[in-house]
Image: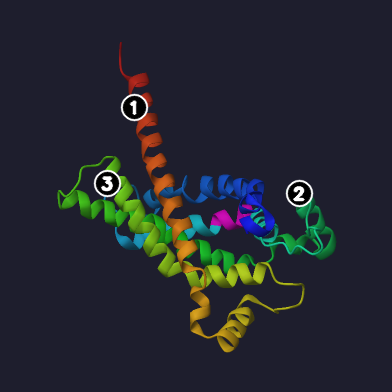
Amino acid sequence: MARTEGPRSLYNGLVAGLQRQMSFASVRIGLYDSVKQFYTKGSEHAGIGSRLLAGSTTGALAVAVAQPTDVVKVRFQAQARAGGGQRYQSTVDAYKTIAREEGFRGLWKGTSPNIARNAIVNCAELVTYDLIKDALLKANLMTDDLPCHFTSAFGAGFCTTIIASPVDVVKTRYMNSALGQYSSAGQCALTMLQKEGPRAFYKGFMPSFLRLGSWNVVMFVTYEQLKRALMAACTSREAPF
C-alpha cells in the first residue's frame, strides 16, 4: 500500500475511525462498570456471567448508537481506486454518497453481524482483561500498576483476535460488498465457507492481532491511568481542609 498508493493510504478513513472509536468506546467501555454493577445488584464480587452480560449489553448498545461511523470507516478504508479516482472524496462525502445511493438503510448495513461482533469483542476484551488482571493480582505475581495493566491488555488482545476474527472477517466482507452481492450476513459467511474454506475466516489474523493487541494495550493502560487520576481528583476535592 505504501509503495503503490503512498504512506498516506495507511491512514485512509482516519476521521471516520476516530468518530467510530469515540462513539463506540464511550458506550461500550464507559458504561461497562455501571452495567456490571446493575447485573450484580451493586455487589463488589462480579461473576463471569455478570461480566459477560455486561460486555454483551454495552457492545450491542454501542452498535445501536454508532453503526454509520463503522460503515463509513470500512468503506472508506477499502475503497477501490480506478484510474486514480476514489469512490469517496472525504468522510462527509462517504456519508452523503451511501445515503443517496443506498438510502438510509445503507448506513446501517451489517448491523446484525456488527452487533454479534461487538458483543463478542467486548466480552473478549473486557472480561478477559478483568480475569487476567484478577488472576495476576490474586496470585501476587504483579501489583495493580502499569506492568500488570500492560500484560493483561496484551493477553486480552490475543484472546479477542482468536475469538472475534471469524465474525470480524464476515462483517467487513459484508459491509464492503456491492449492493445485492449478498442477501444477508449469513449468506456471506456461507459463501466464504463454500468457496474459500474455513481458513478464510482467519484471513489477516496477524494484522488483526497487531491492531487489537496494540489497541488493547493503549486503551486499557490509558483507561487505568485516567481512572486513577479522576478518582484521586475526586478524593482530594471531597477531602476536608
Which residue type carries mark 1?
Ala
Q: Quadrant of the rendered structure where residue 97 is?
A: bottom right
Which residue type carries mark 2?
Ser
Q: Give the mark count.
A: 3
Q: Toward the viewer: 100 or 215?
A: 215
For label 3, the crowd category at 10 Å Cα-Cα, with few meaning under 14, some 14 to 19 and many 20 or more, is some
Verify CB contact (< 8 Å) between mark 3 and mark 1. no
Residue 179 visible to the viewer:
yes
Disc 3 secondary structure class: helix
Nearest to N terminus: mark 1 or mark 2:
2
For disc 3, the marked residue is 148
Q: Toward the viewer: 128 or 141?
A: 141
Q: Which residues are magenta?
A: 61-66
For disc 2, the marked residue is 90
In whole angstroms, how far apart are the C-alphas of marks 3 and 2?
Answer: 40 Å
Q: Toward the viewer: 126 or 202?
A: 202
For disc 1, the marked residue is 232
Give the residue at x 47% y 47%. 31
Nearest to N terminus: mark 3 or mark 1:
3
Nearest to N terminus: mark 3 or mark 2:
2
